[in-house]
Image (spheres, helix red, strand yellow):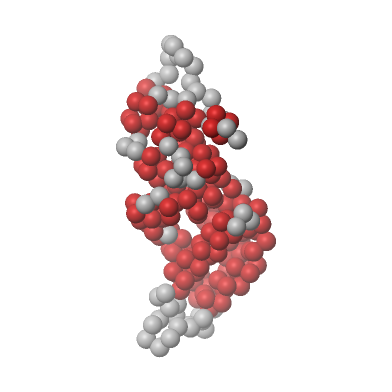
Amino acid sequence: MSRDQQNKVPIAEPLPRGRHGLSPETVRSSQRERLIEAMLQLVAQRGYAATTVPDVIAAARVSRNAFYEQFADKEACFLALCERDLPSLIEEIYTAAASPDDWRAANLRGLRAYLGWWQERPAYAQAYFVELPRAGERAVAQRDRAYRPFLDMVTAMAARARKADPALPPLPATTPRLIVYGVTAFVEAEVREGRVADLLTWADDLQNYMITLLTASGAPGRA
């Protein structure tokens, strides 16, 4: 595939040239979204290291000045991409897990929402799980911060389980991290191996993993 062909990624159409009556804010917002989408598609195709700012500018069809008005460098654009859609993922999980079902069924609903969200976004999954760790310390630190809402969700589900069944032992302090980091590592491995389209097939196995940890007792003194 030629370099020109590689740059033909599906980006939103640019704004009309000349006098269009759009506000500067609308113009900047459109440019930002096109740049982020160009970054997404190019990184998914080539990888982070092989993607350059000129590539992104060409694919997004904006000027060099427009890029640097939005982002300090390639890494900043990539980090904006990696955090752009996570709020919608978190909202979908909360909505699915808010079901009045038994907490185990609610947990499975949330897990299926998580897996299905990534399965429907293979380019984003490739960028986030495979390329983000290669993008430097700032990217890794951002990903570490992104674990927080997922840790909170696991903690809330554990509290829900203990409200339903007071006989369950206290939640070990390490359990939320074991669950979130373990599920993340599993999904990352599947994406890396090109099996993002099969993520939902692992819902029951990951549910068993989560339930086992959510209901287990910890070592003495570690609860």
Question: Residue 123 in the image: x percent, y percent?
Answer: 56, 45
Q: What residue is at 38 percent from the left and 39 percent from the top?
A: 74
Quadrant in the picture for residue 149: bottom left
Compared to residue 8, the image places residue 80 above or below, namely below
Q: Residue at x 47, y 71 (%)?
A: 178
Q: Quadrant of residue 191?
A: bottom right
Q: Is residue 9 visible?
A: no
Residue sticking out furthest to the front: 2
Q: Position of residue 110 (x, y in %)?
A: 57, 60
Q: Which is more toward the observer, 220 or 194?
A: 194
- Looking at the picture, does residue 36 appear above or below residue 174? above
For the point 53% across and 39% down, the residue is 41
Left or right of residue 28: residue 43: right
Give the residue displayed 38% in from the left and 55% down from the top: 140
Is residue 31 in view from this perspective? yes
Residue 14: x and y in percent read: 50, 23
| Left or right: where 78 falls relative to 119 | left
| Residue 219 horizontal side relative to residue 108, left or right | left
Tell me the quadrant of the picture where the N terminus can be found: top right
Q: Which quadrant of the structure image shows residue 193?
A: bottom right
Q: Residue furthest top?
A: 19
Number of numbered discs: 0
**Quadrant the C terminus occupies:** bottom left
Which of these two is toward me, 198 or 174? 198
In the rendered view, would you say 74 is above or below 216? Answer: above
| Percent coordinates x, y for residue 186 in the rendering | 55, 64
In this view, the residue in front, 84 or 153, is 84
